[in-house]
Image (cartoon, grey):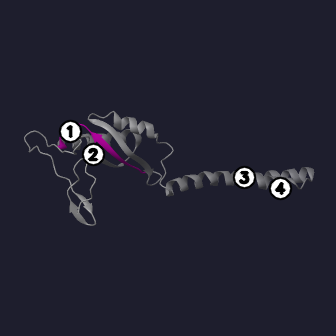
Amino acid sequence: MGASVGVVLAGVVILLTGWLYIDPILSLGIAALIAFGAWRIVRETVNLLLEGTPPDIDLSAVSDEIKHTDKVASLHDLHVWALSSEDTALSVHVVVGDCPLGDAEHMVRDLEQRLCGRFAIGHTTIQVESCHPCGEIHHGAGEHNHPHEHLMFTSGEPTPPRAAGSSAPRR
């Protein structure tokens, strides 16, 4: 539409004044408008392809929403990126205090719903970590309560974790 108006305007100016330079001047103006519009689209596309944070997502607000969740002591490795122009994904590690597994599941589901409702983040991966020094996992009331042994994998062989203060490698 703008290009057509420019062509008609240039034709009228040339007919009335005989000034031929109006045509290339208006052509450059139209080219600048097209380039400006294209730049915006290219910038959005590059952000999407590089999995950048969507411009309408405030990471500090997302972080605050997660921190203000019951039982969440802290969070780290927060990442938010655009999957498409419509879909947004989130990945985060949350550290919880004394929290039975069942409560942690409910907390994660509640957090997913709140993030979807407030920020339109529809794809979430929330990894729950314990703030207990030994990484103990406690089950809810009526279930068995004991610390779980965690294994470290070195060269494909499972080995028990090192004792605190030990620096000797295990074989």
Q: How many marks?
A: 4
Q: Residues within 10 Å of mark 2 (few under 14, many from 20)?
A: some
N-term mark: 1 or 2:
1
Helix, strand or loop for disc 2? strand
Distance, label 3 to label 4, CA atoms, is: 14 Å
Q: Amino acid at mark 4?
A: Asp
Distance, label 2 to label 4, CA atoms, is: 65 Å
Residue assigned mark 4: 23
- Tell us which disc is closer to us: 4 or 1: 1
Answer whether residue 36 is visible to the viewer in this image.
yes
- Tell us which disc is closer to us: 3 or 1: 1
141 with respect to 137 (left or right): left
Helix, strand or loop for disc 3? helix
Asked whether the residues under the numbered discs 3 and 4 touch, taking CB atoms below 8 Å apart as contact, a structural biologist would say no
Distance, label 1 to label 2, CA atoms, is: 10 Å
Asked whether the residues under the numbered discs 1 and 2 touch, taking CB atoms below 8 Å apart as contact, a structural biologist would say yes
N-term mark: 3 or 4:
4
30 with respect to 165 (left or right): right
Q: Amino acid at mark 3?
A: Ala
Distance, label 4 to label 1, CA atoms, is: 73 Å
